[in-house]
Amino acid sequence: MKELIGTGTALITPFHSDGMVDFEALGRIVEQQIQGGTDYLVVLGTTGESATLSSSEKSDVIACIKEANGGRLPLVLGMGGNNTAALTDSISQQDISGFTALLSVSPYYNKPNQEGILRHYTAVANASKLPVILYNVPGRTGASVSAAVQLKMAEHPNVVATKEASGNMDLIMNILRDKPDEFLVISGDDALTFPMMALGASGVISVVNHAIPQIYSGMVRAALNGDWTQARELHYQSLALSNAIFEDGSPGGIKTVLNELGLCGTTVRPPLYDVNPALDQRLRQMAQQF
């Protein structure tokens, strides 16, 4: 899956102040990402506030992104859930035209044990017509996917990668050490992408790349080319912003930065809320530095 090596951006869904999807802004952001050197785009992930989009809105967001992209970058579709039967049914019926892979978060809220997670992902991989990327983000799901389960899933012919956002470097290193050669480990934590790539990760699915694609994608590209001096410099240029955008919730932080850059509004859908005023001011000051 060479299409998944490098920098993917987990696209936001911009909204007007009345809460309706701002498709014009979404098109602008897609174009900005393409021009900035992003390698692929992730559609309807957590950052896209997929949990609060209706089915019809999801279809419209997909159509907007496909039209704006015009086939220039690979697209990854986010589809996850905590009802295995309902999720696999949705996956089997989903129109997958134009997509390269499926990103599926581990089951949330239910807190299944590791055998439950393994069986869930096996069902997802069996149901999907697209290659599957696992997504481990225990800060959101309440349960981490063990290295053993991820390595077991790496043996499935339809599982090609994992997006690792656990922040657990021991777990990540165990996967990198023992994984099949063709299985990709993708950073899901902007601040940890550089050290993860130094250990063998293939890139990132990023949030901060929305705002600074030349710098952040450039860091990933330099690391892939073995230019660790340049990659380290770009890592430290982007590190403060990578951390700050998550301080008071995501995607509120990155939307504030993008608003300062003139790309979209700051509106997020409940239960999310705008970042606090102090962080808003700091993020806007940081955005002006790039």
Image: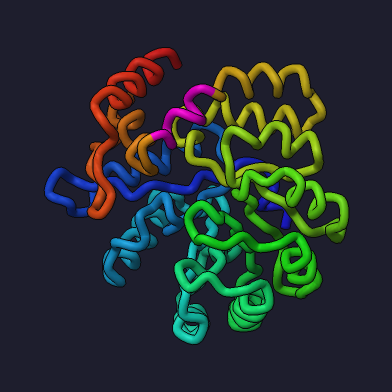
Asked if one can make out residue 45 in the rendered structure from this viewpoint, the answer is yes
**Within the image, what quadrant is residue 230 found in?**
top right
Q: Is residue 233 left or right of residue 274?
A: right
Q: Position of residue 243 (x, y in %)?
A: 50, 30
Q: Position of residue 172 (x, y in %)?
A: 74, 49
Q: Residue at x 65, y 63 (%)?
A: 145
| Residue 244 within the magenta-colored segment of the rendering | yes
| Residue 164 within the magenta-colored segment of the rendering | no
Q: Nearer the viewer, residue 149 or 85?
A: 149
Q: Position of residue 262 (x, y in %)?
A: 28, 28
| Rendered view: 227 above or below 132 | above
Q: Quadrant of the N terminus?
A: bottom right
Q: Is residue 38 left or right of residue 89?
A: right
| Rendered view: 9 above or below 120 | above
Q: Nearer the viewer, residue 217 or 37?
A: 217
Q: Point out the residue furthest to the left here.
A: 18
Q: Point out the residue furthest to the top here.
A: 289
Asked if one can make out residue 23 in the rendered structure from this viewpoint, the answer is no
Q: Residue at x 40, y 18 (%)?
A: 286
Q: Would you say the magenta stretch is mainly helix, strand or loop?
A: helix
Q: Quadrant of the C terminus?
A: top left
Q: Residue at x 50, y 62 (%)?
A: 77
Q: How many marks?
A: 0
| Rendered view: 56 above or below 190 | below
| Rendered view: 253 above or below 56 | above
Give the magenta part as a residue range: 240-247
Q: Position of residue 80 (x, y in %)?
A: 49, 69
